[in-house]
């Protein structure tokens, strides 16, 4: 009975790790596609960052 319980715990852990990796990859992909970030392509800060020129 203890062996079966350990197998379930290991399987759930592996599924959780893989799911988190897929989610992180998806979020990175969406972030890159939307060009989100603190600076634009020329290295300037966006106006929404609380920075005035």
Image (cartoon, helix red, strand yellow):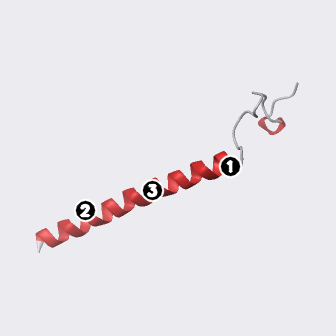
Marks 1 and 2: which is nearer the front? Answer: 1
> Which residue in the protein does label 2 denote?
10
In terms of sequence position, does the residue under pointer 1 or pointer 2 come before the other? Answer: 2
Q: Position of residue 15 (x, y in %)?
A: 36, 63
Determine whether the residue tagged by mark 3 lies in a helix, strand or loop.
helix
> Which residue in the protein does label 1 denote?
33
Determine whether the residue tagged by mark 2 lies in a helix, strand or loop.
helix
Which residue, as the protein is rendered here, is positioned at the far top? Answer: 53
In the shown orientation, is residue 19 left or right of residue 29?
Answer: left
> Which residue in the protein does label 3 denote?
20
In terms of sequence position, does the residue under pointer 3 or pointer 1 come before the other? Answer: 3
Depth check: 17 or 25 in front? 25
Q: CA distance from mark 1 to mark 2?
A: 35 Å
9 over 32 or under it: above or below: below
Which residue, as the protein is rendered here, is positioned at the far bottom? Answer: 1
Residue 14, quarter of picture? bottom left
């Amino acid at each position: 009975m203890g062996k079966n319980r350990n197998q379930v715990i290991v399987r759930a852990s592996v599924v959780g790790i893989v799911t988190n990796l897929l989610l992180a990859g998806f979020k990175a992909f969406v972030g890159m596609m939307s060009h989100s970030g603190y600076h634009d392509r020329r290295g300037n800060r966006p106006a929404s960052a609380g920075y005035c020129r």
